[in-house]
Amino acid sequence: MRHRLSVVIMLLVLTGVGTYAQKETDSIFIERALRQAPGGAGTLHFARLLMGRPYIAHTLEVNDEEQLVVNTRELDCTTLVENVVALTLCHEQKKMSFADFREVLQRIRYRGGVIDGYPSRLHYFTDWIIDNSRKGIVSEIQQKKAPFTSVQTVSVNYMSRHPQSYKALKAHPQYVSVIAGQEKLLTGQKFRFIPKSEIRNSKLLRSVIHDGDILAITTSKAGLDIAHLGFAVWRKDGLHLLNASQIHHKVVEEPMTFRKYLSKHPAHTGVRVIRLNN
């Protein structure tokens, strides 16, 4: 097995694919995780395999030209979600190889599953939800009744207004107008969400949010749609968040309840709920 994995890695390097942030340890971990997963393993099973791994921002911003980056050793909130979703889909579809994982990860991360420069990556999570809903991978849970008592009107422009904060936009200023066009398409779209005042340990919320759902935290910060991501974990005391935490510097299940977590962040307004399609 190790010999075959080494050959795979060597071929990827020789063809210029994943020249950074992809090590043999990633392929070994992924294939072992898929091979050893019990039947019916879902997002929480795979997310918990990544617990304790360090939080590192900007792990995808490493190549001069856009390439698929595989890095299960260092995670931020988005790459945690993407890696876990890719592992879960591979398991459900009985795809067991590292090449299978790469194919699924690319399909999740890029618009239409096609890498075509930096703007083809799904940067805003609203865009990610829309595109992966079109692909049949996820569904956003929304209802015109409690607890979905608030409506988010998306207004995004952060990337195009702060290009200096993004390595690729500094290197390729021509991308800024492309990103601005994508922001324009997202702006004005409306989505129902659960305000943080409605997050409580109730029978209603337990019926709406399931273990392993993706929790996308909405924000009042100008120019952004989603502030943070993680997975829903229900305990006796209520809902908790499994996430790549900048506060804890690693992937953790938050010891505090999700309600308390949201209360500590004034700009967090509530949560949108996204579920993998079986």
Image (tube, rainbow, N blue to C red):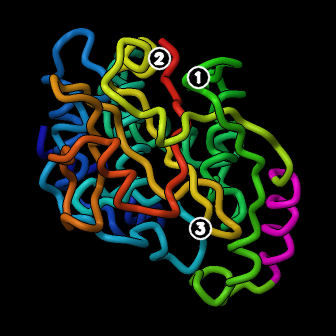
Q: Can residue 11 be spotted in the picture?
A: no
**Image quadrant occupied by the N terminus:** top left
Neighbours of disc 1 within 10 Å: few (<14), some (14-19), many (20+): some
For the residue marked with disc 2, what is the amino acid? Val
Residue 212, located in which quarter of the rendered image? top left
Q: What element carries label 2?
A: helix
Measured as percent of width and height from the top left, residue 120 is found at: 70, 57
Q: Identify the residue at image location x=52%, y=63%.
A: 267
Q: Identify the residue at image location x=55%, y=24%.
A: 147
Residue 117, located in which quarter of the rendered image? bottom right
The residue beneath circle 1 is 141
Determine which of the numbered discs, if any, sits on residue 66 in the image: 3
Q: Nearer the viewer, mark 3 or mark 2?
A: 2
Q: What stretch is highlighted in magenta?
A: 174-186
Q: Can residue 76 be spotted in the picture?
A: yes
Determine which of the numbered discs, if any, sits on residue 208 in the image: 2
Q: Which of marks 1 and 2 is nearer the N terminus?
A: 1
> In the image, is residue 225 above or below residue 161?
above
